[in-house]
C-alpha cells in the first residue's frame, strides 16, 4: 500500500512530463487520448493500481472515465472506461 501511494505521488508530481511523452492508443471510435491531453482537459487521477509489472491509472472528470496503462515509464495506453 505504501509503495503504491509513493508511486502515485511520484506520478502526480511528474504527471505532465510523463504525459507529454506518452503514446496515444486508438479507441473503438478512432480517437486518440494521451495522459497529457486528459490532464489538460482537467481529468483527475482517482486511483492507481499495480498490475504485475505495470501500473494502471484511473482518471475521471464528471461521469467520463479513462484507464491508462503504463507500459513503461514513458509509454501509456489510455482507453475510455464508459
Image (tube, rainbow, N blue to C red):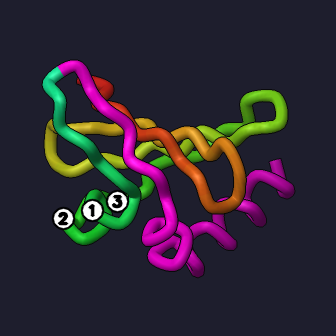
Q: Is residue 26 magenta?
A: yes
Main secondary structure type of the part rendered in magenta: helix
Alpha carbon distance from label 2 to label 1: 6 Å
Numbered mark located on residue 41 in the image: 2
**x and y, in percent, of residue 46 in the image:** 44, 50
Q: How many C-alpha atoms fall within 10 Å of the one at disc 1: few (<14), some, or many (≥20)?
A: some
Question: Taking 60 as reference, is 14 above or below it?
Answer: below
**x and y, in percent, of residue 61 in the image:** 21, 51
Residue at the spot of label 3: 44
Is there CB contact under 8 Å for labels 1 and 3? no
Q: Is residue 17 magenta?
A: yes
Residue at the spot of label 1: 37
Instruction: Give the quadrant of residue 73.
Output: bottom right
Q: Of helix, strand and loop, which one carries label 3?
A: strand
Q: How many C-alpha atoms fall within 10 Å of the one at disc 3: few (<14), some, or many (≥20)?
A: some
Q: Nearer the viewer, residue 71 or 46?
A: 71
Question: Taking 82 as reference, is 16 above or below it?
Answer: below
Residue at the image point whose x is 71% and y is 50% from the top: 72
Amino acid at each position: 500500500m505504501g509503495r503504491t501511494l509513493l508511486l502515485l505521488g511520484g506520478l502526480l508530481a511528474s504527471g505532465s512530463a510523463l504525459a507529454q511523452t506518452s503514446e496515444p492508443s486508438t479507441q473503438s471510435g478512432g480517437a486518440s487520448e494521451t495522459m497529457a491531453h486528459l490532464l489538460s482537459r482537467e481529468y483527475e487521477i482517482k486511483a492507481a493500481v499495480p498490475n504485475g509489472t505495470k501500473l494502471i491509472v484511473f482518471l475521471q472528470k464528471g461521469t467520463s472515465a479513462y484507464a491508462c496503462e503504463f507500459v513503461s515509464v514513458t509509454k501509456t495506453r489510455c482507453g475510455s472506461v464508459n
